[in-house]
Every structure is written in C-alpha cells, then in structure tokens.
Amino acid sequence: MKSTIDNTIEFVKEKLEGAEAGHDWFHIERVWKLSRKIAETEDCDHDVVELSALLHDIADPKFHNGDETIAPKISREFLEQQNVPDETIEKVLFVINNISFKNRDQAPSNPPIELKIVQDADRIDAIGAIGIARTFNFGGFKNNLMYDPETPPNPGMTKEQYKKSNGTTINHFYEKLLLLKDLMNTEKGKKLAEERHDYMLNFLDQFYREWNVD
Ligand code: ADP
Ligand code: NI
C-alpha cells in the first residue's frame, strides 16, 4: 500500500491546489496524521483509514454548488486506477460519504470503526487553535461578519436563528465547534478534543472582553 498512499498524496495535493486555506492540503495532512494516531489505539483496517483521510475533502460540496456526488466519483475512479481491491474501495467510499457534520442526522446507526476514526480526526482539526484559525479564514473567504453584537449567539440557537444572525464567524462556534467534543467516537479522540475545547472557551471569553471596550 505504500506506493498507493504516496500516489494518493500526490493526487490530492494536485486536486486541492488553490483551495481555501481551511480545506487545503495542509488540512488533509493534519487529518491523515491524526487518523493514524487514533488508528494506533483501535483494531481497524489501516489502509481504509489512511485512504479515507486523504480523500475525504477531495471535492467538498461547499465549494461545488452543494453537489455531493463529485467526491465519491473522483475517488472511485482514482482508486480503481490504482488497482485498490474492490472491498477496500467500497469501505473508503462509505467513510467519505458519511463523514460530514452537516449530514449527521442521516448517520449510519452502526458505523464502522474506520469512519469513527477519520470523523474524529476531521473534527479535532475543526477545534482548538487550528479550528479557530480555519473558521476565521472561512468567514473571511465568505466575507462574513466576525461577530454581530445586535444578534449575539447563544448555545441553543436554531438553524433559523442562525440564518438571521447573518452567519457570523463567532456564531459558528455555537452552531458547530463547541458541540464537537461530545460527539467524539473514540477514547483517543475524546482525549485530544478536551484541551482544544477548553482553549476555544478561553478564546471566546477573551474575544468578548476585548470587543466590549469600556
Ligand atoms: P463538514 O464539512 O464536516 O460538514 P462544515 O461544512 O461545517 O463541516 O465545515 C468544516 C469547517 O469549515 C468548519 O469546521 C469551519 O472551520 C469552516 N466553516 C464551515 N462553515 C462555516 C461558517 N459558516 N463560518 C465559519 N467557518 C465555517
Ligand atoms: Ni475535512
């Protein structure tokens, strides 16, 4: 598998050239490394974990008019070209089709361990200092407000309230980032998430103190 992994790295780097900095090759590299770290603590198929981590954002629907069919199609074609066994291809596609936070209501009831691992890794990269940086980068990319004191966020905000709040970057913490710690699947994931979660709480505290100049 070594050469298949190397070829996948090259393929993904090329595909993600020019991507928004929160969803670029460096995000993939971090998720790949985090996935390997978590996989060491679990009984799993390491090839499936590594290939899924590398391919999980190859064509994020956010940047492709919401089209969720592109990523699985590109991934299947690539893996077939690499002569990866069919059984592995199916497992990898299952992971990349089910990893998203957005579609968590449709999550499979009995997810395979490989999905749990890569999902934890992707979510860990969404929190902590890197998570904060990625989120502000995405908000800037979309030209969103950082924060709107007229519609301050609150943890129980519904999707509708969130929309009204102009989708500020600070609101994304309440809509997603602060929820991730309790959604971790693996013990290792839970451990890694805790410190990052606390760091975000401190960040928000300080942000509000600095915002409210008196
Ligand atoms: P997934 O791709 O897992 O469904 P998201 O679509 O929420 O999850 O996006 C992943 C990352 O992109 C987030 O962790 C965050 O850094 C950034 N992001 C997505 N939506 C927003 C938003 N509205 N404001 C700021 N950052 C966002
Ligand atoms: Ni990702």
Image (cartoon, grey):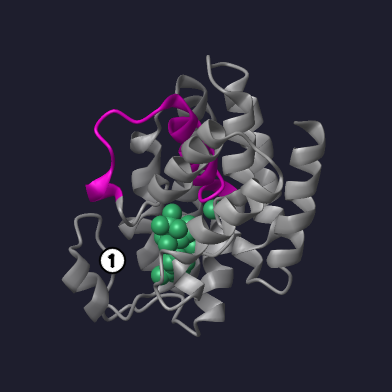
- For disc 1, does the CB lie below 8 Å from ligand 1? no
Give the residue pinned by disc 1.
153
Q: Picture coordinates of residue 126 (x, y %)?
A: 51, 51
**Compared with residue 30, is residue 61 higher up or lower down, i.e. above or below?**
below
Q: Circle 1 — which element?
A: loop
- Determine whether, in the image, residue 162 is placed left or right of residue 64: left
- Determine whether, in the image, residue 2 is placed left or right of residue 157: right
Taking the image as drawn, is residue 39 in sight?
Answer: yes
Taking the image as drawn, is residue 208 in sight?
Answer: no
Assess whether residue 110 is covered by the magenta stretch: yes
Q: Residue at x 31, y 59 (%)?
A: 175
Q: Which residues are magenta?
A: 104-129
**Compared with residue 2, is residue 40 higher up or lower down, i.e. above or below?**
above
Along the line of sight, the residue nearer the viewer: 193 or 106 = 106
| Quarter containing the N terminus | top right
Assess whether residue 51 is covered by the magenta stretch: no
- Determine whether, in the image, residue 29 is placed left or right of residue 195: right
Which residue of the protein is positioned furthest toward the bottom in this rendering?
A: 143
Q: Picture coordinates of residue 83 (x, y %)?
A: 68, 41
Few, some or many C-alpha atoms within 10 Å of disc 1 (few <14, some 14-19, many ≥20)?
Answer: many
Q: Picture coordinates of residue 118 (x, y %)?
A: 52, 37
| Quarter containing the C terminus | bottom left
Q: Residue at x 56, y 52 (%)?
A: 76
**Compared with residue 59, is residue 87 higher up or lower down, i.e. above or below?**
above
Q: Picture coordinates of residue 153 (x, y %)?
A: 28, 66
Q: Residue at x 49, y 56 (%)?
A: 72
Q: Residue at x 34, y 31 (%)?
A: 111
